[in-house]
Amino acid sequence: QLQLQESGPGLVKPSETLSLTCTVSGGSISSSSYYWGWIRQPPGKGLEWIGSIYYSGSTYYNPSLKSRVTISVDTSKNQFSLKLSSVTAADTAVYYCASQRRDGYNLWYWGQGTLVTVSS
Amino acid sequence: QSALTQPASVSGSPGQSITISCTGTSSDVGGYNYVSWYQQHPGKAPKLMIYEVSNRPSGVPDRFSGSKSGNTASLTISGLQAEDEADYYCSSYTSSTFYVFGTGTKVTVL
C-alpha cells in the first residue's frame, strides 16, 4: 500500500514561491500505474485540483493556476514537488498530494495534508 | 473548466437513504466513466469511496453505491449511519482540463 507524505514550509510570504515535496513510500514513483497529483483546500472551502505529473515528466495543470504552477518529479528520491509562484492570501490552504490511477483517474492514496499560510 | 455541480447540503435520519447528485457536461461526467466520489471528515484527508462511477474499493461498506445517467452522476448512501456525516466530493476526468472536482456536499445525519 502506498503512503504519501507532504513536507515544506508552513508559512510563506506574499509574492514569494510556495514549495512542497511529497515523498512516496511502499511503491515506486516510476510505476506505470499512477499519475502523481497535488490538490488543495482553502479553509472552510472545497477541494481544488492543482495538477498531476507522470514519472516521465508529462504534466497536466489546472488552467486557473497554470501560469504559476510547476510540478516536477525526482525518481531517484521517489518524490514529486509543487512550486506555486507569486502567492497571495488566497493561496492559503491545506495542500494534499495523492496517487492518481492512470486507468481511472481516481485519487487512490492521499497524504495527510499540510497547511500552508500566506502571510507577512 | 468550472467545478462539477453538487447540492450544498443533504440530510437524512439514521436508516434512511440519501442521494447526492453531481452534474457536469459531455466533456466530463457524461463523456467518460471516470467519476469518483470522496468522503472527507473534518480535519482529515479525503477518502476514495467510489471509483469509475460505481465501483467500491475494498473496505468501503456496500451501503455506498454510485450510478450515472447522462451528464449527472449520483452517490447513494443506504441505511444512513451517524459515521456517514461528512463532506462528499465527486470528481471526473475531463477532456478539456484533465481533472475536476465537484463543489462538495455536506451530509448531515439528523
Image (cartoon, coloured by chain):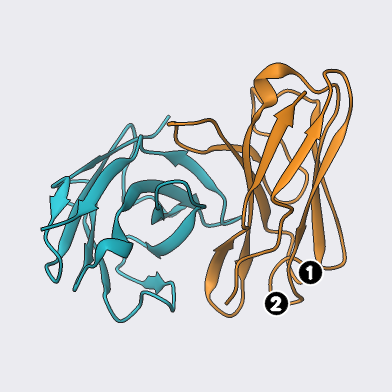
| Amino acid type at image mark 1 | Gly
- Give chain A's shade: cyan
Circle count: 2
Query: Which x, y percent locates residue A114?
Result: 28, 41
Residue drawn at 34 percent across, 46 percent down: A94
Q: Indicate left or right for B18 with A59 as reference.
A: right
Residue drawn at 62 percent across, 57 percent down: B103
Q: Is residue A79 visible?
A: no
Query: Which x, y percent locates residue A53?
Result: 36, 63
- Give chain B's shade: orange
| Amino acid type at image mark 2 | Ser
The reply to whether dot 1 and dot 2 touch (C-beta < 8 Å) is yes
Marker disc for residue B30: 1
Q: Is residue A77 visible?
A: yes
Residue B41 drawn above or below residue A68: above
Query: Which x, y percent locates residue A112?
Result: 35, 34
Marker disc for residue B27: 2
Query: Which x, y percent locates residue A28?
Result: 31, 43
Residue closer to the observer: B57 or A7: A7
Q: Indicate left or right for A54 with A100 as reference.
A: left
Residue drawn at 28 percent across, 43 percent down: A115
For disc 2, the neighbor class at 10 Å (few under 14, some 14 to 19, many from 20) is some
Alpha-carbon span between mark 1 and mark 2: 7 Å
Residue closer to the observer: B86 or B35: B86
The secondary structure type at the circle numbered 2 is loop
Residue drawn at 85 percent across, 21 percent down: B79
For disc 1, the neighbor class at 10 Å (few under 14, some 14 to 19, many from 20) is many
